[in-house]
Image (cartoon, coloured by chain):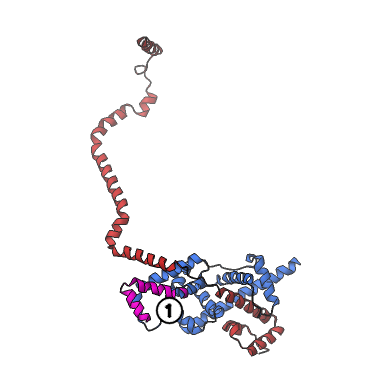
Chain colours: A blue, B red
């Protein structure tokens, strides 16, 4: 069925292509949301994905699903968009907002397992973005999929086209970098707290 | 496990994939090892932040499909025009301007020389040097001549 739809779209049937866009845009948006949080950027990336997909319809052979094929195009498109962006060299405690500092204190005190409130989720999301910004876009992708979305190594390999060992190496490296950055933040935050007391 | 540092384990897999037994062992080690304790705490909090980040998904707007189709039509319209024609369309204003300017310059170059020669002669007669430095009596009106000229004009006016 996917192959039929792709063939019809390739033959110039606009309604078939519109159906592909309608059916798979939630998936493409979900992939683009891993890389961008601003709606305009997510939409720009998603549009780019579908335009690329249209020109590459001939290369879709129907061995896998359209969804998987689009996921890979989306991942590569977003990675390309991000490659030019500048990375933050280091993330310091002075960059933290008051909300983020108090969230960190709260998390240090808790043993985990509590359901975060909506406000806390926003703070945590901002903090995660800052932590991820010290990584390369590829490492961000691997870590966010595995640690954030509970994706398997195989799923990441399929979405990106990387080998499983490459995914493992990327995830390991990214996890360690993020953990070290978080460790620095926590120790500085505690020091700042005790100095304030 | 109690004597073994746990940092490698924390970095090799997401905390959420560790079994309860593994987590208990990690916690037991962390109680006695300060560096592993801070590593475990950082890994745990990072995971919470990453999980929150993963829940942020932008939903497609109802107009997205229309937007993509419009962009596709625009792209097809651009591609349907031959490359040379597209190049001409984008460059025609520049090329036309350059052609007009060149023609104007050529016209000026070919038409000016006949007038330019006497003009340059005159220029040499009334050069800056002669105007400033050559103050011979022949070229200058006397004070009386100036007054006469003025009063003659007044008489004519009456």
Quadrant housing the C terminus of chain A: bottom right
Q: Position of residue A94 (x, y in %)?
A: 65, 65
Q: Residue at x 70, y 71 (%)?
A: A190
Question: Label 1 belongs to which residue?
Answer: A67
Task: Decide whether residue A40 is among the magenta residues.
Answer: no
Say which of A85 and B23 sits in front. Answer: B23
Predominant SS along the magenta part: helix
User: As drawn, is A81 to the left or to the right of A196?
Assistant: left
What secondary structure is found at the residue carrying circle 1? Answer: helix
Q: Which residue is nearer to you in this view: B117 or B101?
A: B101
Confirm whether residue A58 shows in the render: no
Q: Residue at x 35, y 65 (%)?
A: B73
Rendered residue at 29%/28% (across/down): B122
Chain for disc number 1: A
Query: Where the N terminus of chain A falls, by quadrant?
Result: bottom left
The spot of residue A4 in percent (x, y) is 34, 80
Q: Residue B85: give x, y in percent of width and height.
A: 27, 59
State which region is magenta: A1-26
What is the crowding at mark 1: few (fewer than 14 residues within 10 Å), some, or many (at least 20)? some
């Amino acid at each position: 069925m996917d192959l039929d739809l792709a063939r019809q779209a390739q033959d110039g049937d606009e309604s078939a292509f519109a159906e592909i866009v309608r059916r798979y845009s939630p998936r493409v948006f979900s992939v683009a949301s891993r890389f961008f949080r601003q709606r305009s950027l997510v939409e720009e990336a998603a549009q780019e994905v579908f335009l690329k997909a249209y020109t590459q319809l001939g290369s879709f052979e129907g061995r896998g699903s359209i969804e998987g094929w689009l996921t890979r195009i989306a991942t590569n498109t977003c990675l390309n968009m991000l490659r030019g962006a500048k990375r933050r060299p280091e993330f310091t405690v002075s960059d933290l907002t008051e909300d983020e500092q108090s969230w960190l204190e709260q998390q240090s005190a808790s043993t985990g397992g509590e359901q975060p409130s909506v406000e806390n989720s926003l703070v945590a999301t901002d903090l995660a973005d800052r932590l991820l910004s010290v990584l390369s876009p590829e490492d961000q992708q691997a870590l966010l999929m595995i640690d954030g979305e509970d994706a398997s190594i195989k799923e990441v390999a399929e979405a990106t086209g990387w080998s499983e060992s490459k995914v493992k190496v990327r995830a390991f490296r990214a996890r360690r970098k993020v953990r070290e950055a978080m460790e620095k933040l926590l120790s500085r935050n505690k020091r700042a707290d005790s100095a304030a007391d | 496990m109690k004597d073994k540092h746990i940092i490698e384990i924390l970095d090799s897999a997401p905390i959420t994939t560790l079994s309860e037994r593994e987590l208990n062992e990690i916690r037991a080690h962390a109680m006695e090892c300060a560096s592993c304790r801070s590593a475990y705490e950082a890994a745990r909090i990072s995971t919470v932040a990453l999980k929150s980040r993963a829940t942020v998904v932008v939903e497609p707007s109802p107009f997205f499909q229309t937007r993509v189709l419009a962009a596709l039509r625009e792209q097809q319209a651009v591609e349907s025009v031959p490359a040379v024609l597209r190049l001409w369309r984008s460059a025609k204003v520049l090329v036309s301007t350059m052609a007009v300017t060149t023609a104007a310059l050529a016209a000026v170059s070919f038409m000016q020389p006949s007038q330019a020669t006497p003009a340059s002669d005159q220029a040499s007669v009334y050069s800056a040097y002669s105007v400033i430095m050559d103050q011979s009596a022949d070229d200058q009106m006397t004070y009386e001549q100036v007054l006469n000229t003025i009063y003659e004009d007044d008489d004519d006016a009456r």
